[in-house]
Image (spheres, coloured by chain):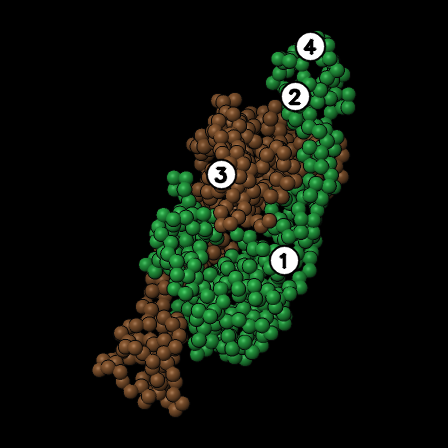
Chain colours: A green, B brown
Amino acid sequence: MDKLPTRNKLLHHFYEHWRPQLGTETIPIDEAEGRICAKSYQSGNQIPLVRSSAFDGIAVKSASFSDGMPDTSVWIKDQDFCRADTGDDFPDEFDTVIRIEAVTFLPESGVKLDLSKEPVPGEGVRTSGSFMSKNDELVKEGDILTPLSLTSLLAGGYTTVEVKARPRVVFLPTGSELIKPGTPLTRGKNIETNGSLIKMIMSKWGADVTCLPICYDNHDSLRNAIFTALDSADILIVNGGSSKGNEDFTVHLLEKESSFFTHGVRCVPGRPAVFSLIQDKPVINLPGPPAAALAVLSWGIKDLYYHAMGSDAPHSYQEVILTETVSGAGPFDLYQRLFLYKKDGQIYGKPFSMKDSNAEVNQYCNGYTILHSDQSYLAGSPILADRLFSSVR
Amino acid sequence: MDKLPTRNKLLHHFYEHWRPQLGTETIPIDEAEGRICAKSYQSGNQIPLVRSSAFDGIAVKSASFSDGMPDTSVWIKDQDFCRADTGDDFPDEFDTVIRIEAVTFLPESGVKLDLSKEPVPGEGVRTSGSFMSKNDELVKEGDILTPLSLTSLLAGGYTTVEVKARPRVVFLPTGSELIKPGTPLTRGKNIETNGSLIKMIMSKWGADVTCLPICYDNHDSLRNAIFTALDSADILIVNGGSSKGNEDFTVHLLEKESSFFTHGVRCVPGRPAVFSLIQDKPVINLPGPPAAALAVLSWGIKDLYYHAMGSDAPHSYQEVILTETVSGAGPFDLYQRLFLYKKDGQIYGKPFSMKDSNAEVNQYCNGYTILHSDQSYLAGSPILADRLFSSVR
């Protein structure tokens, strides 16, 4: 058991054997949130193109002030001054902007200025390119595109962006005891919920996940289902049959059919996970218990999904204060589900225990940490957690 | 200026005047991630229904061990023992499960057990309801539904869930200087990017956002556009014209047409934001500069969007170490954009400064904090940040 690889070693070893072969695609910027950028982009625009007013006011000629305060009551609009509001361009003969708060427009013509000193030439003017310069780097290859970086692309003159193609993910639930959600529960049966869990979580990463019908425990059906799925999958997740049960066909089948195969990881729950390669595509055998599926999804499949696109997986790591003392699981690392919450300006992480019902865990869990084997973590000490969801209680 | 309300006071005051009138809707569970639950749900299922094996093994009769170790070499399958893998139900005559690791199946019949002591009755058996009990609370009214809590609903026997209806959000960009993304930039023009920013950010909250065509600065066009938009909006965001410019019609129009109106907030950027009510619907006038739009979106529109559904807005608050000394903005609070990153197990927040280009800010910004007026925050000190996006650099 303690010969099992750690999570990092397992993934590292897997990546030595796997060469993802995904291409790129060019998509509208409005649809690119969360996608991985395939190349660097520089701004094609200079913003503002010439220069613009820094605030709401009037544009004036600074030369008018070269001999001290002029008689502005005789000023003529659009000749001695013009309106120039925040971001406005204005005619070239003006070079300085005075805030509207210092200006009173006189009834006939002219203005009254309430200034403590003459304006400095160029005051109140944003120079050409002050918002964005032509050739400013906007994004680079491997960046995860965010709403903010995508608006930079729009401002820089782009409407589409080249991104890494997403791996097509297929989920195959296996097990004769499984029934579809909505089916009345009878003795010995179990409602298949991991497909929905995986689809909902992976969709948040922008993944395109197809859930196949339940495959019952039969060697030939399972073999057929796996090879059919591989026709349309870049990553195949087979759920169930990963352990040592009588009908755990999946492990043996993957061991036989794969060019690379590793069974087990030094982390619980999820210890019996299989990471294999068939037709150079990752085929993961995810353990059936939902807590194990969540764990392997968090540390393993997420990493692998982003690795397929040449990126590190994004995380929302944060330091939180542990509310109860917890320990690792003997020789195993422990995927510890947490309820992260804010109280009096401090963020806490409440670890769930065996005493908490699954319903309670599922209702409150919004993060996790991984406790290292043979270590204790005292209540009140800081730990590094990863947030799974933003949720309020 | 320092008479302006704080963010909290402004929202509190607004909520005193606004009674959101949204109903509920019943939707498939697979589509409910991020939605607000409209009522409490209890499990309709007892899981396992009877009881099940806690691990891969064989189910036995504990009575067989009442006089010490029996001769198991003569045991007959399905009479003295049966296979029972993790989660399996098994016939009622068996009451105890022995791990497969302790079992050797003999060639003819019978088994050899490698046990240090006789099994205790009920050992290795998960009791009825040990995964989920009938009537366990699964979710309650106001919960933000997560992939985990939704799988509890599936396990509890549900396939649909009643959620709060989402406010329909309409975004109306205004300003004669605006041009659509993809249009060549000419002098005095500005590419409209706030619509995309708002649509992409609000979509992450599950919002349904419609962006209208650009409305040019003309009082009647603007008035028409606002009232037409209100026919299909529950929340209307009008962008631009919030300040004191010559063509800032929006403020005056909203002041005239609204039953409730407040102009300005003690936080920059975004100081001139308007929060108003027309036809009992929130009409927000968002300042045009993208940094101001992001700020008001983060502290204001997000709160209001969730308030419409009777929920507090979810945040990903976390304590981070500030990498540079920053100060609040005189009498104003300051919405400070941050680059959050992990280094050596610690999370840092790098504040952007005026020296950083907009492109750089947009490329790296993935969080923010709000600095309180007249306070300084020293490099190295902890501050509470809110994460906007999970992104890797």
Judging from the image, what secondary structure is the residue with disc 4 in?
A: loop
Give the label, 3 or 2, closer to the camera. Answer: 3
Q: Earlier in the sequence, mark 2 or mark 4?
A: 2
**B336 horizontally vs A289: left or right:** right
Give the label, 2 or 4, closer to the camera. Answer: 4
For mark 2, what is the residue? A57
For mark 1, what is the residue? A310
Q: Which mark is residue A69?
A: 4
Q: CA distance from mark 2 to mark 4?
A: 18 Å
Question: What's under tag 2, amino acid-wise?
Answer: Gly
Q: Which mark is residue B380?
A: 3
Determine whether label 3 and label 2 are within 8 Å by CB: no
Residue at image x 64%, y 40%?
B360
Residue B63 position in % (x across, y down): 25, 80
Kindly indicate whether the residues beneath marks 3 and 4 are on one polypeptide chain: no
Give the label, 3 or 4, closer to the camera. Answer: 3
Q: Earlier in the sequence, mark 1 or mark 2?
A: 2
